[in-house]
Amino acid sequence: MPNEVFVTPPRGIPGIGTAAAYASGDAFGVVFALEVPLEGTIANVIFYDLDDEGLDKDIFLFSVAPVGTADNSVFAPTDNEVLTCVGVISIADWKNAGSNQVGMATPALSYYAPSGKLWGQFVTRGADNIAAANIPQFSLVII
């Protein structure tokens, strides 16, 4: 029997400061929770770059809710938070679509989430400056 596919609907990255100058290594938004199957493999991450920046991102995923880093501050999880990290996915493959871009990652990251949730926080690897009407969104494909 083939694995069932679970796709999170596209959702905006919470807490992004619009018209704020980010630096590489800054938290990009705030911590968020994702309802996921208890276990699975993240096969794809789709990043909808509605602001057409095309700057690489990492998404840190945790099995327990971290306190997190404030938006637009240097990403600095505590040692205890790092110990609950189930993986880091880098989004570095960009496809320009005119006035926006789509970033893709195919991590094949297996996880176990006993609570049915994973917590995440994005980190930018560029100098973003997001317009208010163009908050990026993302989606996960889990098998």
Image (spheres, grey):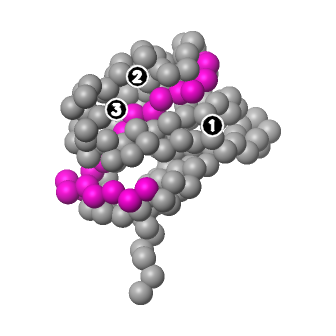
* Quarter that holds the N terminus: bottom left
Cα separation between marks 2 and 1: 21 Å
Specify which label sits upstream in the sequence, 2 or 1. 1
User: What kind of residue is marked 1?
Assistant: Asp
Q: Position of residue 60 (x, y in %)?
A: 40, 38
The residue under the point 42% across, 76% down is: 3
Residue 137 disc label = none
What is the span of residues highlighted in magenta in the rendered image?
Answer: 109-129
Classify mark 3: helix, strand or loop: strand
- Magenta stretch containing residue 119, yes or no? yes
The nearer-to-camera label among 2 and 1 is: 2
Q: Position of residue 96 (x, y in %)?
A: 76, 41
- 24 and 36: which one is in front? 24
- 6 and 61: which one is in front? 61
Residue, disc 3: 31
| Residue 69 higher or lower than 50, as above or below | above
Q: Quadrant of residue 142?
A: bottom left
Residue, disc 1: 49
Residue 75 disc label = 2
Q: Quadrant of residue 36?
A: bottom left
Cα separation between marks 3 and 1: 19 Å
- Looking at the image, the residue that sits furthest to the right is 98
